[in-house]
Amino acid sequence: MKSIEKKTDILIIGGGVTGSAIARELSRYNLDISLVEKESDVAVGTSKANSGIIHAGYNAAASSLKGKLNSRANPMFDKLCSDLQVPFKRIGSLVIAFNSDDLKILKFEKENGEKMGVRGLEIVSGDRLFEMEPHLNPDAQYALYAPTAGIVSSYEFTIALADNAVLNGVKVMLETEVTDIIIDNDQIKGVKTSKGIIYCSLLINAAGLWTDDIAKMAGHNNMKIKPRKGEYHLYDKSWGNIVNHVLFPTPAKSSKGILVTPTVHGNLMIGPNSDEVDDKEDLTTTSVGLNKVFAGAKRLIPGLSKRDIITSFSGLRACEESGDFIIGSSSQIKGLINVAGIQSPGLSSAPAIAEMVVDMIRDISQENDTGFEMLLKEDFKEKLPERYVFNDYNYDSWQQIVDSTPDYGEIICRCEQVTKGEIVNAIHRPIPARTLDAVKRRTRAGTGRCQGGFCGPRVLDIIADELEISPLEVTKKGRGSEILEGKTKDILLKAGEVDETV
């Protein structure tokens, strides 16, 4: 592979929701912007596996950065998700209290939220509470109702942000790992990557779980990211209507607790637990952890059973020891901006984080000789082009699409009713889906009850055809996860089980 050497104004490390949101916000300006991601797709770290909740903003302390950014970002999601064609439902949340001690915490959170301008907070009880949630534990006494809370698919939102950034000129380089940082006279000059050198005037470290490792490469040693693992169960869509809101227990000191929520696509999700781990890649699930998740959810909704759980998974949160977001210019290295410790409510805060970082860059560009000037583009594209999703259309409207493009008439994923046309579109989006998991995140093919057992081989064939590669080269999630080992006849020939002359 030929080694690259390029120059860019601003380089972003990390293709999670934070890095992607910053890339999109920066793409409003006439700048040369690049984003590097070490994995084969964006949204594959913390942004892939979390609760998908857009928090109302009452949880974090009003004095904390994450509290301020959450409450500022929450109202942005309606327009942003509409522009990016990402499903978003503002269904509201309830924090459930079982006794007078819990009620004190609810009152504190209500006052905290009101200080930050969170609208519509109220404490509900009695008949009204059970009218809102008929399947709630009868022992529940009170709940803090936050009507502005919502649900979204965190990875679809991240991918759409990155797609829109690319559409506006940002260059995204996947499978490009930063191996060192080039510094001259305490000033960022660029980075060394697994694919070559990228020179830059400003470096934004949004590497999620690895922000402390990236900062250390630059000699910035006063940051420590500790992974915190959360496990989840996901139910079949037949359970999606058992709750109407996001249900939280009264929070503990380290966590908002095990929640019960419908997903934006109509499933039911329960989780997470919260365990500190040492390995930043430990995504294992355990029977102990998952049983704890089930017990915690069952305390809120006693009628839950393990029947119809279709998959279980875990995600890692990038927790910094301070407990708050760390967003700011390095005091030791000029041209380095760290965006670290973006644990919950990181997804909810991402649009405001992006605005904050852009404001910082504007100030830096005016004070220092960065070599660039921040001028707004006249042709910034606020919206992504329309994408056709079978489940969003009635028969007559969909037939018009099929008449124009017959691929939209062929169902590939029976569980989620995903057509070939949707998969082909995903493979050719601005951030192309080149793996089975990447197609799954963009179209939901493989997320249903059979978990890809039926559609997986067909999606593999479509990827191979569209990319004009051998099916043997198609992977589940990037290099090293090839799905097919070889042609059946070749394997049998090697084993001497067939006559080569036949």
Image (cartoon, grey):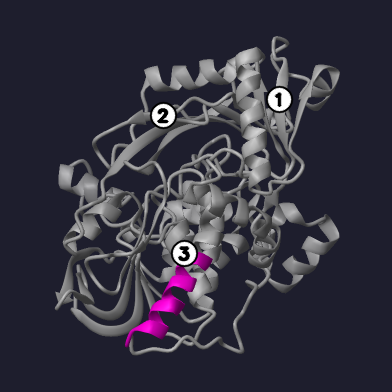
Q: Nearer the viewer, residue 409 or 313?
A: 313
Q: Which residues are magenta?
A: 355-369
Binning the other alpha carbons within 10 Å of mark 1 as few (below 14), some (14 to 19) or many (20 upward) gives many
Kind of element beneath mark 2: loop
Residue at figure coordinates x 70%, y 9% from the top left: 139
Magenta stretch contains residue 83: no
User: What type is the residue that disc 2 sits on?
Assistant: Ser
Task: Look at label 3 and name its amino acid.
Answer: Ser
Do the residues under discs 3 and 2 have CB atoms within 8 angstroms? no
Mark identifier at residue 274: 2
User: Circle 2: is it few (<14), some (14-19), or many (20+) Cα within 10 Å?
Assistant: many
Q: Please tell me whether the stretch drawn in magenta is mainly helix, strand or loop.
A: helix
Answer with the quarter of the image where residue 1 lies.
bottom left
Location of mark 1 (residue): 143
Camera sees residue 199: yes
Q: Which mark is residue 20?
A: 3
Total marks shown come to 3
What x and y, as percent, mark residue 364?
Answer: 38, 78
